[in-house]
Image: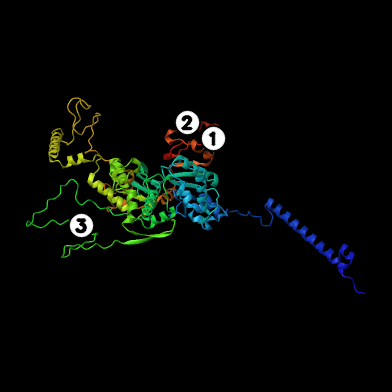
Amino acid sequence: MSASLPHRSVANIRAPTPSSRSGSHRERESSSHRDRDRDRGERGDRDHSGTSTPTRPIPTFNTPSSLRAEEELIVIDFGTRKVQVGFAGDSAPRGVVWFGPEQQRRIGDFRDWQTDYQQDWRSKAAGGNWGRDYELWRPDVRGLELGQVGDKVEKAVREAYTKYMLIDSRPRRMVCVVPTGLPIPLLSAALDSLFHRFQPPTVSLLSSPVAVTVAAGVRSALVVDLGWNETIVTSVYEYREVASKSTVRGGRKLTEETHRFLAKELGHVQQDNKDDKQEYVLSFEECHDIANRLVWCKPFKAEKTPKSSPPQPASPEGEGLATVEESDEDEPTTTTTTAGEKPLPPPPKVTTVPIRSGRSPTSLELTFDQLSEPCENTFFDSQYSLSSFDDHETPVHLLVYRTLLQLPLDVRALCMSRIIFTGGCTTVLGLRKRIFDEVSHIVQERGWDPVYGKAKEQLRTNPKLKKRNGRQTTMNNNNNNTSTTPGGVSPPTAGGAAGEGTAAPPGQEEDGIWHDAANSVPEVDPIEAQLARTNPSPNSRKPLHGQLRAIESLGPWAGGSLITHLKVPTVSTIDKDQWTQHGVTGATVRAADVEAKTQQRLSWNAMNRGGREGKEPWTLGVWGAA
């Protein structure tokens, strides 16, 4: 009888075989030997007499992404229609996010594929929201939903994180480049969204005109921001904003003028009503696309004959040559035929513009001269006199001239030779050159005298008044020559103050202090002196000032990236804990408004708390406080 299989017998399962018993004994002996060796090694480590190698601690390193997250700074440039996001130290932003209706769609919203959804813009335009979905905010905060502004900011920054920068949402320090005229409610909504959604330790604020100046490589400039809602002219002197003026002429008005022009060509009469009452026959997206692609600006043409000069009389027949009228070289010349008839000029160039968002698709035949009308009516309005404009709707070239005119003499000399054009409307063909030529013409015509008009022209052209002014100038020069000392310097009066003793010389002020501007020593610029010491080259050019000149800039984001990379202190730095505790109401107006007693109280409280430093008062800088 054959032996039964091991798994068929219960005795084989319960009672271990000799081979298995010896194997288990061998395993117990090996485990006891291992425990004995381990105890001996630990005892040798304690006594420093063992032969076994001591255990070494395993080094722990953080991942490169966590190390980079502590050092990298995020630079965000907030605009009306787009947000630029990137890392500090880069020359260009990593991503640009534009605002539009597609950004407000949620997951599962497939209305874009419906047949009648493309014509849904008419219901929004009827309520005065024509183009509002393409904006982040607007200067008029009345009726504006601030919560929606915060949601747009969060979606734009998060899309830039995940789509362009390829980083996670861990806390990182942020630097925001915003215009100085931004209302406080909008700034508060943007900061609330950043602090509560992304948890940055600090958020720093930078001025957009100063960042544009830094990106151009200069310290002083006149920044002309041709933006979406308005055009802002800001003068920057030594990285400080000196003056700022604005007008409502911007990209939105250019798009509305383009819509009015196209509606007129289609046969619709447009009236100059408010936005909520105006009838829109074309979509915002199509009008904006035509304005970007086809609208251009005509070059500047000066008047051939000045208004003050009288017309030249015609020469009689038979005496000399006939007077020939000047004509523009660009205009086509015509020749006179033998029959005395002039041939017709060549037809103007025509382009075909397809219209798809109207009631019925059609096409318009437009000349290139007609396509320049929206830009002319938006930024210049040459058909109206200057006295017909309010302060908030001044033409752009006149706004630039008035800003330069109100600056001090030394600031104007630097800013006029460093004019920077920035903003979205700078892409319009010929607009920057037209504004520069208009300003140059006004300077040549008026100079830097704020008084102008018919009386000023009569004073300039009247020979009798010229003789009288020349006689007074000669008498003043004679008085100066007789009252000067042999050293060439006029002495002060004997009485000390003006009006006491002898008469004061013409160069003396009425405050009793004698001013000699001609012989005064100019102040030394420490920065220029340091540059001269570091670069003592004889061929180094002096900085240009006193002449009109336009320069280029890399834009506000590049300037903010450079300032942050060089670790330059920003205008305002807001801590997360202070913002979450107080909000915008915890900011002071200026850092100088913090009194000395307040600083002493804060330092005393910090000492009483065991040496912990107290939170210093923070400020919003040029943006003010609520």
Mark 2 nearby-residue class (10 Å; few <14, some 14–19, many ≥20): few
- Residue type at mark 3 is Ser
Callout 2: helix, strand or loop?
Answer: helix
Q: Residue at x 77, y 59 (%)?
A: 31
In front: label 3 or label 2: 3
Mark before the other along the chain sequence, 2 or 1:
2
Precedes in sequence: disc 3 or disc 2: 3
> How far, Cα to Cα, is label 1 from label 3?
83 Å
Describe residue 351's horizontal placement relative to residue 99 as left or right: left
Q: Toward which corner of the image does residue 361 lie, by quadrant?
A: bottom left
The residue pinned by badge 2 equals 598
Q: Residues within 10 Å of mark 1 (few under 14, many from 20)?
A: few
Q: CA distance from mark 3 to mark 2?
A: 73 Å
Q: Residues within 10 Å of mark 3 (few under 14, many from 20)?
A: few
Residue 518 location, x and y as percent?
Answer: 21, 39
Residue 356 percent location from the top left of the image: 43, 58
Which disc is residue 611 wearing? Answer: 1
Q: Residue 624 appears at what percent x and percent y?
A: 43, 38
